[in-house]
Image (cartoon, helix red, strand yellow):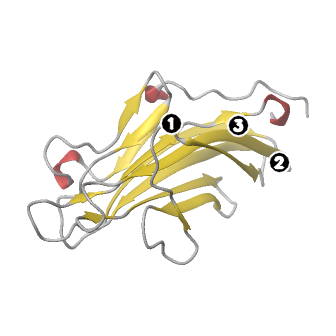
Amino acid sequence: MASQPCPVFTEFNQWTRSGATDGQFVQNTGPIQYDTTTDTFLSVADNLSTSTTATVTLSTTFNVVAGRTYTFSWGLRGSLGIAANGSSKQGLMITAAQAGAPTQTVYAGQTRNPDPGFEQILIAGPPPAPRTSSFTATLSGPLTLSYTFTFAPRPVGAETANDDIYAKVPLFATNTC
C-alpha cells in the first residue's frame, strides 16, 4: 500500500480524555494540561485520595497499514511533586491498540520506585529528554494511540503531592507512514 501522510497530533482537541475526573484531584491541580508552545502534556495533578490510584488517559485514533512499523519522536521528563519524601510516584504508559489485535505497550515508566516492567522516569529540568518509540500495526485500519497517566495514592499529610510528568506528543517520522 502506498505511503500516506503521517498523522500530526499537536492540537489538544485531537485527543480524547477519559478516566478520572477533576473531582478526584486536589482542587486546581488538573488532571492534564497542555502547553501549546511545546506540544507537551503537563501531568501535574495531585491525587485527592490516600488509598486509590487515579488514572487519566489521552487517546487519538488514526489509520495504519498492517505490518508497517510506525516510529515517532517525543520527549519525557519528571519533576518532584514537593520533596523526595513528601511525594508519591506518577506513571505513564503509552499503548497502541486495534480492535481484534493485542494491545502493544510502546512505553511504560514511573517517577520513583518503578514497578516491574516500568522504567524509571528521570527527575530532570526542562526540556523533556528526547525519545524515540515505535510500534508495528497488526491490522490495517484504525489504531488508537493512548497516553495513560497514573497517580499513586498520596501519603497522609498536608504537604504531600504527586510527582509531575511532562510528555511531548508524538511526532511521526515521515518515512514510516
- Regarding mark 1 in the picture, which secondary structure is present there? loop
Residue farthest left in this picture:
158
Report crowding for label 3: few under 14, some 14 to 19, many 20 or more residues within 10 A (C-alpha). some
Residue sitting at x 26%, y 68%? 85
> Where is residue 116 drawn, in percent x and y?
54, 78
Q: Secondary structure at mark 3?
A: strand
- Circle 1 sits on which residue? 127
Residue tagged 3: 63
Residue 139, percent from left and from top:
77, 51
From the image, state whether disc 1 or disc 3 is nearer to you: 1
Task: Tell me which amino acid carries mark 3.
Answer: Asn
Q: Is residue 67 above or below residue 118?
A: above
Query: Regarding mark 2 in the picture, which secondary structure is present there?
Result: loop
User: Left or right: 75 with respect to 55?
Assistant: right
Toward the viewer: 83 or 169?
83
Q: Which residue is drawn at the image coordinates 42% and 54% (left, top)?
A: 149
Q: Say which residue label 2 marks.
A: 66
Residue at 81% in and 26% down: 4
Q: CA distance from mark 3 to mark 2?
A: 10 Å
